[in-house]
Image (spheres, coloured by chain):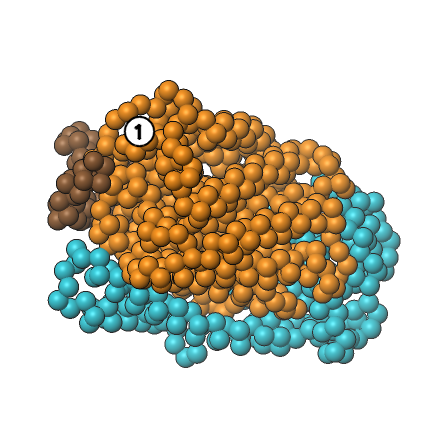
Chain colours: A cyan, B orange, C brown
Amino acid sequence: MKFGWLEITLFSIVLVVVISAIFVRGKNWLEPGFWGVFAIVSSLVMFSILWLLTFDTLKKISFGSARVPSPTVINHKIGFEYDPDKKRYMPTIGEEELFFGKKWSEQEATQLLTKGKLVIQSRNCMDCHTLLGNGAYFAPDLTKSWLDPKWQTMIQPMIGVATKEETMAKWLQNPEYYGTWQRRMPNLKLTEEEAKAVVGYLKFMSAIDTNGFPDHFGKSPAIF
Amino acid sequence: MKESKDLYESQKLAIGYWIVAICLFGAQLVFGLIISYQYIQPEFLHKFLNFSICRLLHINSMILWLLFGFIGGIYWFLPLETEREVVGIFLGKIAFIVLTAAVSIVVLVFLLVQIGKGEMLTLWLVTEGREYIEAPRWADIGIVAVFSIIFFNVFASIWKAKKLKGILWVLIVDLLAIIGFYIAGMFFSPNISVDQFWWWWVVHLWVEATWEVLVGVLVGWVLMAVLGTSRKIVEGWLYLEVFLIFGTGILGLGHHYFWIGAPEYWLGIGGFFSALEPLPLVAMIVHAVYDAGVHRLKTINKPAFFWIVAQAFGNFIGAGVWGFMHTLPQINLYSHGTQLTAAHGHLAFFGAYVNMNLALIYTALQRIRLHEGSILDGTLWKWVFIGLNLAMLGITAPLTVAGFTQTFVERAVGGSTWQAYIDAQSHPWFKESMIWRMGFGIMFFVCYVLLVADLLTIGKTKATHQQ
Amino acid sequence: MSADSVLKMLLASLSFVLTAGLYAFFYAFGRLKGSFFWELFSFVFALMMMLSGFFLVSCPAFTLFWKLLLIFSIFSYLIIPKAMFWIVEKIHQKEGEEEGRLKTLK
């Protein structure tokens, strides 16, 4: 869409006022019908604009767009760096790296993510954690969980496997054995396959451009 | 005492809806108390009834009981408006039984099965795992079917009575929108940004648009019943409300799209419209004060009147103040997904919807229990009114303090990591807030018990008197 | 933006709308009672509302557009109570609502 948000906003308001003004000519503003016109016009205008924006947004957040990467992003190193031009943090997609010891084809990666999403929904993750900031507040936000330093500083030495993804998969299958705090995640009976899928999903989610949320993830605040 | 045979069949059905609603209200509070205790003692019921299960039951029973209450309100006032029995009332009764049975099955599955394997079958039979609309897909379809029957009841009655205008016209369109938006939440997408995009269509457009308008309709009916406000004023006011709610609320949906991966223009659109959202709520305060002041002594139903006035203030404080506090994107970047959201949710749902439902039920009780012209009043309802409102403030104030702590310690200083989260949750301000919240939660529950006692007895004792 | 300023902005936006509402409440209350004291009292909240609003405007986190939006909100909150009171009075006058009510309640 070529228009900026300010134009859209002002356009919608002007449209409501102008169309309503045409229809209410000659009506007394104390009559209910006067406001009835405004109610109908504002609902129709705002809803139509929401529809237009929905089509535009769905195009911009499909797999492989600039904001939501293709599932094969799990074959790459992912970071989260400050972008001076946009004045906010942006995910960075770096050089290739193996994920669970192999390179995933587009089809395999899509299957993995679909499985991961199904597992996340079937275990009600969202009713303790937040995903992209939405959910319950009993457990940490998982938006950038893949980038969390704790996996390497605390969990990996505890479990003793070679890579971060294996650490996460192992931990997810036995969260109670590797307690990190007084609030323990219950064992949700993830199979190895399911745990791998969830790890893949977390890696993919950390590469979504979330307009800078959460700000300066994992970094000292002194720089902002 | 009035004989219940004076009531329309549809009004008897309304009473059924309200009984289930009040029971679900109790269930909501029990699960709320469990999860508030799990914040203090995380090992409580660990492995048997984890936080996630109680939490989803807490929020889902809330949605359901409010909805049951609203449906009750529709069935109560519809025959009065159309001056005839509701068309297809038998179907409506079957819908009620089916809905109640389905809710019981879903709750049992949530309690006993809890989770499933990571495949589509789980989404169809056990849980959909999306906050607020966890109900499995079969229940979703059932809800839409039942709602269609209710819509048929409403539409056919209005059509036969030839009264498709004014308030009833708004009701029809709004019911259609409620059904339509619910369908937006019934599919699976592996892309979490797409998933949450449509998910907010259901959650936001229900709660912040169509429900608000439905409540506007019900408030209008209650005002006519307990204050004798003229229909013309109610209609004009309702249209104005629809104009302001849909005018700001539909694109205000943008404030949920700040951080889910959606394009940057939502920051501007969402921030702009939600900054405007408190303006009409402030205007409503003036109207409520005026109405309360002018009509104070002339109401025939004290409890309903107080709850309906509290609704205007509750809406302002919950949606207006607590909503605006963290809605601007520059602030929301740090406060999103903290206990501030919980504080806002508690106050807004209580202020806008719980108050409304209680006013509805008291309005009906007058008709059921008293002679025409008698005043519904008593002592107990006053304590319940003060107690519930105080307890709700007592629940949300600590949540707000906890939210400030999280915003500062976890987000602004700590950089939102796992460890930063633990630091914030271990902060004394957070931990003590959780204890205060639990205390006021217990107070809320006690007041709920008194509320049930009052609903069962008010109007039956000699505290009521002839006008 | 420092971590402290996030907290200050949160507090300011809380007090901004809250005091706007209190101003509206006490203004309407004072007008209804015909009490000059309560009307004067309400202006204390109007002042607090303006102070919170201008604190937000002065925050460097907001760009020009947001500053303008906030200034617009401040002026709206200032005039809403007076304007709304006028409208409400007008509506009720026009309807001659008192008779209507007496009829309904008998």
Percent across and percent down for residue B94 are 55, 53
Q: Quadrant of residue B40?
A: top right
Q: Secondary structure at mark 1?
A: loop
Question: Percent from the top left, x then y, of residue A61?
Answer: 56, 72
User: Quick check: B361 above or below B415?
Assistant: above
Q: Nearer the viewer, residue A26 or A218?
A: A26
Query: Which residue is rendered at x = 48% and y = 72% of the image?
Result: A54
Q: What residue do we see at 34% from left, 48% from top?
A: B80
Q: Amino acid at mark 1?
A: Ile
> Quick check: can you spot residue C48?
no
Of residues A160 and B88, the one nearer the viewer is B88
Determine the residue positioned at 17% across, 43% down: C100
Q: Position of residue B330 (x, y in %)?
A: 45, 55
**Quick check: C63 left or right of B136?**
left
Q: Is residue B208 above or below residue A210?
A: above
Mark 1 neighbour class, 10 Å CA radius: few under 14, some 14 to 19, many 20 or more: many
Residue A60 in the image, given as x and y percentages of width and height = 53, 75
Residue at horizontal 39 percent and vertical 72 percent from the top: A48
Q: Is residue B464 visible?
A: yes
In the rendered image, the quadrant that contains the C terminus of chain B is top left
Q: Is residue A86 left or right of residue B216?
A: right
The quadrant of the picture occupied by the N terminus of chain B is top left
The answer for which chain carries disc 1 is B
The residue that mark 1 highlights is: B375
Drawn side of residue B139 relative to residue A10, left or right = right
